[in-house]
Image: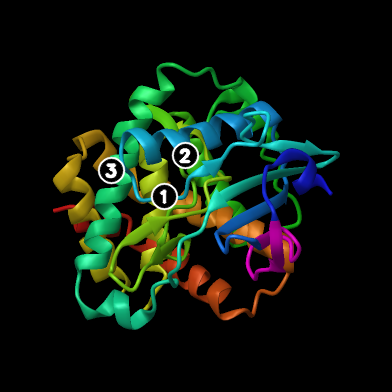
Amino acid sequence: MLLSNEYDFSVDQLNLLEGGFRPDETYLLITTDQVKYVVKYIEYSHSLEHLQSILKFENLLHDSYEYPCLQIILSSKQQLVIRDDNRFLFIQTFIQGIEPTREILDKDDIYLHKMGHLLAQWRIASREYSSIIQIEEEDRELTDQWWKKQTIHNVDPFLLSSFLECKQYLINLKANFERGLIHNDFHTNNSIVTNGGNIFIIDFVDACQSVFVADLATSLFHLLVDQRNGEHRAQAFLQGYQQTIPLIEEEINVLDMFVRFKLTLSIIEDLRDSNDSDHPFIQSCFHLLHKLNNHSTLVNNLCL
């Protein structure tokens, strides 16, 4: 009913798709003309205005920068997103493709090099966009107000120690790092590769205002968590990134700590959601966190 009221679509099929935080939030819509779209019907912890700013940026990337991402389809009233009680509805173009497999990632460095380049391109576009939008303080990461909201209770002592050490370090940083709207979950699982080898970046809804080096840190820990080939993957990603935007010395010097911090937060959030500390991915994350704790320049060395 909501779709028919808000969009000028003649719906032939609406099929549930796997993926997403909730099992009922992603659908494949097929019109009577057999055009496919992705319907997102999500719960969202931030404001409608914040989600609108993210989706507006996604369309800016798509339209003005020819960035490989999905396009948000406007409603019949020219809205990017529709609020429905405590959930939000928006529709995107559909791209036929797959999540990159280990075989694709390990075949050569081209995919990861391209991913690094795409994150750097995001940063370039975000510089311009962030100069013309206003982000509320509560939605800005690593500000005093943001830190006050980070209450950590009943977690593994090692995780708590890592969080507090990173927090103390980051709060005391004197460098004024470049800020903007970051993807905040930029990694290979949030990319699609088509049969023609084209890469598309998806899942923008975790985007927030933060320092750009934090976005890079999230990408790197998702690569480094692979115990067999993680460091090589991260290095290939960094090469692609730095060929587009060379990191300044101050960013390189703090990258290890940002990777530790983003990894620590990710483990805490994953355990809060599932409480399955024996899950292979969680175990790999713990392994990486111990490794980073014992080797404080591991990521820094990959930038050389």
- Residue to which mark 2 is pinned: 58
Q: Amino acid at mark 1?
A: Cys
Residue carrying label 3: 120
Density class for disc 3 (Cα within 10 Å; few <14, some 14-19, many ≥20) is many
Is 27 left or right of 124, judged from the image as shown?
Answer: right
Q: Determine the residue positioned at 19% across, 75% down.
A: 108
Q: Please state the horizontal and vertical placement of residue 73, each as a whole percent of the image.
A: 56, 42
Separation (CA) of disc 1 from disc 3: 14 Å
Q: Where residue 69 is drawn, which disc sits there?
A: 1
Q: Are marks 3 and 2 in contact (CB under 8 Å)?
A: no
Classify 20 as above or below 86. below
Amino acid type shown at disc 2: Glu
**Magenta-span inclusion, residue 159:** no
What residue is rendered at 72% in x and 58% in y?
25
Determine which quarter of the picture holds residue 35. bottom right
Q: Is residue 147 above or below residue 30?
A: above
Give x and y (percent) for residue 143. Answer: 55, 26
Q: Is residue 117 in view?
A: yes
Q: Which residues are magenta?
A: 11-27
Q: Dot 3: what SS?
A: helix
| First-in-chain label (1 vs 3) | 1
Labels 1, 3: front one: 1
Neighbours of disc 2 within 10 Å: few (<14), some (14-19), many (20+):
many
Across and down, in percent, residue 150 comes to: 66, 39
Kind of residue at disc 3: Ala
Is residue 257 something one can see in this rendering?
no
Q: Can you tell which quarter of the image residue 290 is in? A: bottom left
Query: 32 and 182: which one is in front?
Result: 32
Marks 3 and 2, Cα distance to the nearest angstrom? 15 Å
Disc 2 to disc 1: CB gap under 8 Å: yes
Sequence order check, earlier mark of 2 and 1:
2
